[in-house]
Image (cartoon, rainbow, N blue to C red):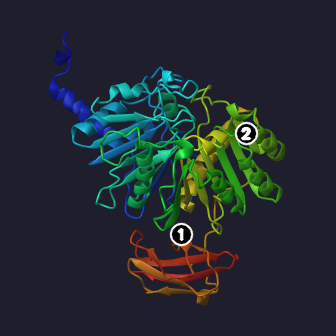
Amino acid sequence: MPLTNLYPMKKISTLLLLFFIYTCANAQIFGPGHHIIAYSTHAVDTTYARPHNKATSLIHKGGDTLIAYINRAKYTIDIALYDYVEDSLWYEGGYVPPIHTAINNAYARGVKIRWLSNPTDSSAGFVNSITPNYGLALINKSIHTFARTDTKGIMHNKFMVIDGRSTNPSAPIVWTGCMNWEPGQIDKDINNIIIFQDSALAHAYLNEFNQMWGDTVEGGAANSTKAVFGANKKNVNKKHGFTIDGHLVEAWFSPQSDDSTSNHIVSVQKLAKTEIDFEMFTFTYTTDDAQMITANKAGIKLYGIMDKSSITYSPYTALSAQMGANLLVYKGLPGYDSNGICHSKYMLIDPCDMAADPIVFTGSHNWSASAEDNNDENTVIVHDSSIANQYYQAFHADFYAVSAAAGAGITLTQTCTSKPLEVTEIRNADQVTLYPNPANNNLKVILNTQSTDAMYTIYNIAGQMLLSGKLSASYINTIDLSNIASGMYLIRVTNNTKEEFIGKFVKQ
């Protein structure tokens, strides 16, 4: 019987509408003052969430959320993706939604699309570094695609820029993290996704995309004669630091002739005051483990999960000797896949220490010599205590699950909880100037100290932390209060000499 007799067009339209509603319902939408969203593809433990800061798990829904963001595109989509497969039987198997349908629908409504991939053709000299990318056969043939032409290394990025050059500053979106668009990666493996709504960051990612594409025309064909990959790339972004929601976000790309991602890995590790946590798929580069061992010997807590594929390399040997049971090996988990992998590549610095600078370090970059010297990779360093806490909720759940699967039952000593403040508690308030007080939507803060580096946190009268960020002693700081209700609040300021100042203010 013909398909049209079984499914009249009206019913098909209804099903498509319901599918669109479903996919949008499974994706958070950016709100005022919240322009960074993080996801885990595995379970999270929200008992370690700070107030109003529960992490979001995308178990079996990473692809649906991806589609929801593609459906929001109005002008452009630029994709740099290592591998894209929609065959649910491919490799580990698993659920994968029709991503190609969302891409083709976007193209049909006028969105200009460019797709950069890793090579699929072994005849071109990529014998040891090709990926199937079977999904590319499903997208509209009029959409321009281009594969890396440098045979030394791989195009390992996993990022998408939506409406990157939109004149509306709230429109550009950067989707990145560790997840390839494959059934096992979406449905079974440990991965993390982080999404930014920020025009300046989107432009930085487009600059990197364009030098690999060899051209800047939106939706246009790549120029293979001008395309640059791997060690031949230039540092095309003069700016690498961006302020998003009052927090510093750094964007780095590798390799670049005048920079080293490992330098940033080590630099961030040196900032740790209390704790370093990490999940890593490929960990073979000794430069990246030495500082963690030094930190752990100095009393800094160190916990980690490495994929089983890395245990034959020297970093595992050195770290396991130092960390003992605090270094776990991922061999798959019941409920996901016994053959799954820990594909995340992230590090947390002081996620539970509000007096420090909680940091998330993540992206496509494995800690390997190939990633450092030859592969095309992207990295973000997010100095945001709320995002660090969300990643910690995912790390805590993963650590306990892997530990339990191994029969170890290891206890993490850090709990990421903070002692509530009493509303009457005031200390050294003269060292911080707050105005106007009462305040409307903006609170001005001046540091009356010699400190050059400080963090603030704002609490309500119940002791719940509502806002946090960095302060500079070099200028008048403005804190956006538009998303908190009228009432009395405490602001705690801690500087780099561990001094603490607490003041009171009223939001009208």
Q: Nearer the viewer, residue 57 or 368?
A: 368
Left or right, residue 203 beside residue 343: left
Task: Please tell me whether mark 1 sits on a helix, a strand or a loop.
Answer: strand
Dot 2 lies on which element?
Answer: strand
Q: Determine the residue positioned at 60% across, 29% down.
A: 340
- Bin the neighbour count of mark 1 within 10 Å (Cα to Cα): few under 14, some 14-19, many 20 and up: many
User: Across the whole image, how many numbered discs are drawn on residues?
Assistant: 2
Position of residue 400 in the picture relative to residue 492 (left or right): right
Residue that protrudes farthest toward the front in the picture? 225
Which residue is tagged 2?
Answer: 328
Q: Pointer 1: what residue? A: 469
Q: Amino acid at mark 1?
A: Gly
Can residue 235 be seen here?
Answer: yes
Residue at 43% x, 85% y is 438
Q: Is residue 420 above or below residue 40?
A: below
Q: Which amino acid, mark 2?
A: Leu
Asked which quadrant contains residue 213, the reply is top left
- Quadrant for the N terminus in the image: top left
Q: Furthest-top residue in view?
A: 1
Q: Can you give x and y, in whole percent of width and height, for residue 290 in the image?
A: 77, 51
